[in-house]
Amino acid sequence: MIESGFSLLRNENQVFTLANERKILFTGLDDALLGNPQFPSSSQMLETSYDILLTHEPDEVRHYRNKGYELILSGHSHGGQINIPFIPQVQKKATSLMSHSDNYTGGLYNLGGNKKLYVNTGVGTTHVSARFGVAPEITVFNIGI
């Protein structure tokens, strides 16, 4: 990842200043299954216009929903990879195999107030090297701040 030019945020904050001088805070947490997620200082939230939390496993939102972030971005579930119309039990079973993604499998969820969780279904696979009825996804957000 680093060799490809990506910045990994493991229990770190990164503030970006927009052309209009408003600031967005990104907080990235370490993986809940293989790492050790710990929140960095939240003091930068006082200086920013919008705060986004990045966490791999969507069900971990139960620990983070009251931390003050307007948007939480997650993945991990792959949308279950298999979704047969009119047989939702197949997708539910597929997502249950992915611990930490039973409750939030894909899409936008309202967490109350101005807080939202978005779970991206991604482009890859896991466990089964196939996708059916779950289109690969790259999401673009347009946040008006």
Image (cartoon, rainbow, N blue to C red):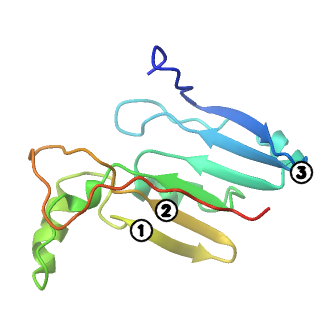
Q: Are marks 3 and 1 in contact (CB under 8 Å)?
A: no
Q: Are marks 1 and 2 in contact (CB under 8 Å)?
A: yes
Q: Amino acid at mark 2?
A: Tyr
Query: Residue 46, labelled with which disc?
Result: none
**Real-space Cα separation, disc 3 to disc 1, in angstroms:** 29 Å
Query: How crowded is the residue under tag 1: few (<14 C-alpha within 10 Å), some, or many (20+)?
Result: few
| Residue under label 2 | 118
Q: Amino acid at mark 1?
A: Gly
The residue mark sitting in front, 3 or 1, is: 3
Q: Amino acid at mark 3?
A: Asn
| Left or right side of 5 for 88 | left
Query: How crowded is the residue under tag 2: few (<14 C-alpha within 10 Å), some, or many (20+)?
Result: many
Q: Mark 1 or mark 2: which comes first in sequence? A: 1
The front one of 136 and 90 is 136
- Horizontal and vertical percent position of residue 82: 14, 63
SS state under label 2:
strand
SS state under label 3:
loop
Q: Is residue 41 visible?
A: no
| Residue under label 1 | 107
Query: How crowded is the residue under tag 3: few (<14 C-alpha within 10 Å), some, or many (20+)?
Result: few
| Left or right side of 77 for 113 | right
Vertical side of 135 occupied by 11: above or below: above
Give the residue at the far top of this rendering.
3
Q: Residue, x 65% and y 51% (percent of image)?
A: 52
- Horizontal and vertical percent position of residue 59: 41, 58
Residue 111: quadrant of the picture: bottom right
| Residue under label 3 | 20
